[in-house]
């Protein structure tokens, strides 16, 4: 159980960093696409767009898979709070994936929720990582001394 808590602690920290990088990849893709529009003319084809957001899409898929692993690690801790947070993160990541797939069909609703949800995910992961690092490891209680034989 203690091993799963250690894995959970480091995994949630790694995921927090990955989400920060992912948000950076989104900005990189947006500005790369804007640059292509200004330098190549007034259109961007689908391949060019996918090239700009390729890193964002690839890392996003890995983050969703890592969210499933986080949830599985949380089950190993057998701690209700960690299980709830792991489940919440995985649920938010599945929602994020669905928003990415459907965002273009309703950009002012679903598309707008995609980056907002990204910051919610970052907040939950960041606060979870903070809690894990702030919490001191549980001390192992010392064994009680054996009772001494009665004095004669």
Image (cartoon, helix red, strand yellow):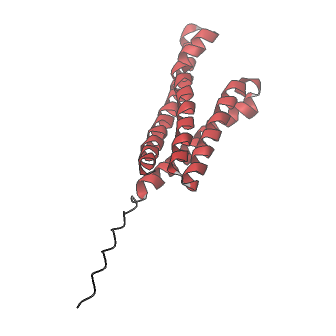
Q: Position of residue 25 (x, y in %)?
A: 51, 27
Q: Nearer the viewer, residue 48 or 150?
A: 150
Q: Nearer the viewer, residue 39 or 137?
A: 137
Q: Position of residue 151 (x, y in %)?
A: 24, 89
**Up-down: is 40 above or below 13?**
above
Q: Position of residue 111 (x, y in %)?
A: 70, 30
The quarter of the displayed image where residue 64 is located: top right
Most extreme residue toward the bottom, as rendered? 152
**Up-down: is 148 above or below 138?**
below
Q: Residue at x 56, y 23 (%)?
A: 57
Residue 43 visible within the image: no
**Up-down: is 69 above or below 51?**
below
Q: Residue at x 62, y 45 (%)?
A: 88
Q: Nearer the viewer, residue 106 or 133?
A: 133
Would you say 105 lies left or right of 50 here?
Answer: right
Would you say 152 lies left or right of 60 here?
Answer: left
Q: Position of residue 14 (x, y in %)?
A: 44, 39
Most extreme residue toward the front, as rendered? 152
Residue 3 visible within the image: yes
Q: Residue at x 50, y 25 (%)?
A: 28
Q: Residue at x 69, y 31 (%)?
A: 99
Q: Nearer the viewer, residue 101 or 119?
A: 101
Quadrant where the C terminus is found in the figure: bottom left
Picture mark count:
0
């Amino acid at each position: 159980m203690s091993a799963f808590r250690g894995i959970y602690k480091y995994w949630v920290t790694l995921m927090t960093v990955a989400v920060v990088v992912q948000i950076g990849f989104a900005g990189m893709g947006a500005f790369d696409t804007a640059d292509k529009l200004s330098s190549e003319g007034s259109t961007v084809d689908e391949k060019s767009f996918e090239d700009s957001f390729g890193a964002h899409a690839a890392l996003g898929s890995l983050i969703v898979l890592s969210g499933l692993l986080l949830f599985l690690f949380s089950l190993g801790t057998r701690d209700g709070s960690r299980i709830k947070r792991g489940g919440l993160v995985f649920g938010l990541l599945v929602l994020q994936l669905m928003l990415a797939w459907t965002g273009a069909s309703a950009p002012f609703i679903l598309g707008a929720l995609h980056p907002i949800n990204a910051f919610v995910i970052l907040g939950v992961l960041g606060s979870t990582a903070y809690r894990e690092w702030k919490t001191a490891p549980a001390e192992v209680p010392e064994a009680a001394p054996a009772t001494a034989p009665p004095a004669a």
